Image (cartoon, rainbow, N blue to C red):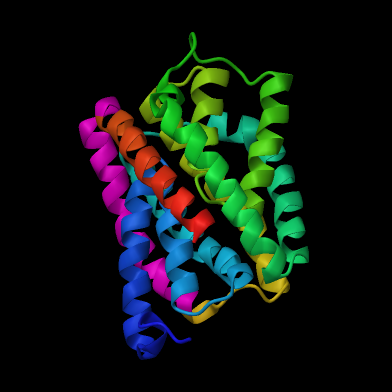
Amino acid sequence: METFLQSLPPVATWAVLAVGAALAAIVNTMAGGGSMLVIPLMIAVGLPPSVANGTLRVGVLVQSMTSVATFHRRGERHYGFVASLALPVVLGAGAGTYCATLLDDAMLLPIIGALLAGWAVVLLLRPQRFLEPTGEPRPPTLGVALAAVGVGFYGGFLQVAVGFPLLALLTMGVGLTAVRANVVKVGLVMVYTLVSLPIFAAAGDVAWAEGAALALGSILGGWLGARWQLRAGAPIVRWFVIITATLSGATMLYSSLA
């Protein structure tokens, strides 16, 4: 049965996606979980889950590039930490993306629902834990690198709420402060999405018109999110984590049961 969003003309559909992507980009840049707004929206306008999962990466890439550029102009240039974790994250993301392209929609949808329900439990318990640095900043250990492979795999496979485990890795594993961890997180997401997007595209899982709409919204959202974070500092990041974790968790539970 055709839904209201599916009955809209293409231009209106693209406008809806652009607005959703802008809101998601702000949330993603500030903390994480913004993709929870976009994947259900893309499925609601008629994209299959596999194509929604791949098309999402167009907006994520543009949003990340915009945020990195904004952080760079504002003097937040923590590229050493990005470089130290880029390889394990990219290796994991490549493997996760390839696995995602092997699944059909009948298999992918319940997997998404199960993962979302799991995240709901984790995020609703203590969302502030992702912003508690342990000690001084330090080079990643072997354990942190292995964890980065796992986080990269998840990001390549699904992307939804990947900002939360990345923040946990960077604060608790590397000892970065909230704002610095967010800057490094955005850089890592940009790097592994440069690998994930071509794999999804080669598998035919990217709807480029819808992806262009996401990209336009993501430019605005990524810019606003980065500026807001740098202006307000760590407290606003902490509150965004708490708020988006709660909202994402509730949405995840609803999506998995719907």
User: Which residue is at 35% across, 83% downward?
Assistant: 4
Residue 37 in sight: yes
**Residue 124, percent from left and from top:** 42, 33
User: Which residue is at 66% across, 53% downward?
Assistant: 157
Q: Nearer the viewer, residue 158 or 82?
A: 158
Residue 111 placement, left or right of 127 = right
**Residue 241, percent from left and from top:** 36, 35
Seen as rendered, the residue at the extreme left is 231
Seen as rendered, the residue at the extreme front is 257
Residue 222 in sight: no
Q: Nearer the viewer, residue 242 or 10?
A: 242
User: Which residue is at 66% across, 55% downward?
Assistant: 111
Q: Is residue 16 above or below residue 31?
A: below
User: Which residue is at 52% across, 51% downward?
Assistant: 160
Magenta stretch encompasses residue 127: no
**Residue 75, percent from left and from top:** 34, 34
Magenta stretch encompasses residue 220: yes
Q: Which residues are magenta?
A: 210-235
**Residue 123, percent from left and from top:** 46, 34
Q: Main secondary structure of the magenta part?
A: helix
The tally of labels here is 0
Q: Nearer the viewer, residue 100 or 198?
A: 100
Quadrant hosting residue 129: top left
Q: Is residue 136 above or below residue 170?
A: above
Residue 12 placement, left or right of 68 = left
